[in-house]
Image (spheres, helix red, strand yellow):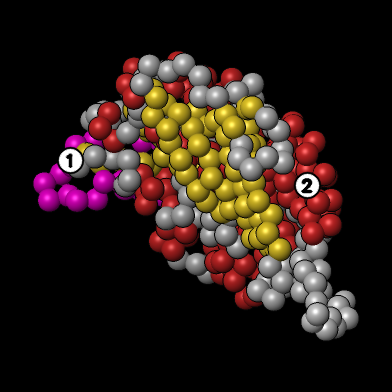
Amino acid sequence: MTNQTPSDPSVSYAAAGVDIEAGDRAVELLKDHAKRASRPEVKGGIGGFAGLFALGKYREPLLAAGSDGVGTKLAVAQAMDKHDTIGIDLVAMCVDDLVVCGAEPLFLQDYIATGKVVPEKIAGIVGGIAEGCVQAGCALLGGETAEHPGVMDPDDYDVSATAVGVVEADELLGPDRVREGDTIIAMASSGLHSNGYSLARHVLLEKAGLPLDGHIEEFDRTLGEELLEPTRIYARDCLELASECEVRTFCHVTGGGLAGNMERIIPEGLVAEMRRATWTPGQIFRTIKTVGQVPDAEMEKTFNMGVGMVAVVAPEDRDRALAILTARHVDAWVLGEVRAAGEGETTRATLVGEHPQY
């Protein structure tokens, strides 16, 4: 018989930094959030090894999938100790990429990595994700929360998600539908959304030394509250527009700015010409530009500048499209038109003129 040594209580998963009980408590706290963000097609519940979703009847369905995160906006949420809206940003970054091709978001799965699981914090993050799913009309089908002691600091976390949608093959939107003379319609952003935060933080927090909890008169709230304004989710607005108008394609304005993203949806031989004179960027953009003395070109390739989503529609549907968006409380306007490219012109998207009062 072999000699047995007394067990060492310091040798355990908990002693190594992973609290299984805390993870279980977090799961219990987030169940109600998941139930709120559901659809009839969801089969089963939280806790299984896989999320199940009944696809339903389609003629020729194409599945669309997209993954994303929210970047360094997380640093602001962590510094403010406010975690209940960052999930809305996460959903927005995923589902609004799907609707560019006309796909309806069906479900989303999230991934949260943290140095230490604090159940209430995790539940707050998931609560924001659930709210984003409700706004987008998709289900929160499941996810994963991983504790990474020794890899991440206890208060740190990162989030990512994958969204899946569906579109009929003959209703797929894209550059091949865009025609000369099409109308370009802008939809206003709610602020910075989830891009450009490394530059915004460098200018406002590091260079200018502004405190996140300091009240800014121009914003009528604290700087932190302004920076944490949730990303607008356009999914339902875009799907409604596509069902009522001849939409050629959409453009989700994220990293790379307005012109940089429009380049991705305009076919060779055409140019999206957009007029700066049609809108004035919001105060947050003016503040970053002024405080940081950021060149206009740098601003435009980093931030959305007040335009979060773009629709390219048939010219005869221009007024109808604007009326639909207005009825859905989306601030929208004619941004420009699609024209033929000039001889030797290779740029597919261009901004002309100047912003008023900017």
Whether residue 187 is visible, yes or no, is no
Label 2 crowding class (10 Å Cα cut-off): few <14, some 14-19, many 20+?
some
Q: Looking at the rendering, which quadrant does residue 201 occupy?
A: bottom right
Identify the residue at horizontal 20%, vertical 42% (top origin): 268
Indicate whether 250 appears above or below 91: above
**Direction from residue 330 to residue 242 in the image, left or right:** left
Residue sitting at x 36%, y 44%: 262
Q: Is residue 276 left or right of residue 219?
A: left
Residue 42 position, x and y percent, is: 63, 27
Amino acid at dot 2: Val
Say above or below: 169 vs 220: above
Is 350 left or right of 48, judged from the image as shown? left
**Outermost front residue:** 1
The x and y percentages for residue 38 are 67, 29
Q: Position of residue 111 (x, y in %)?
A: 62, 52
Location of mark 2 (residue): 27
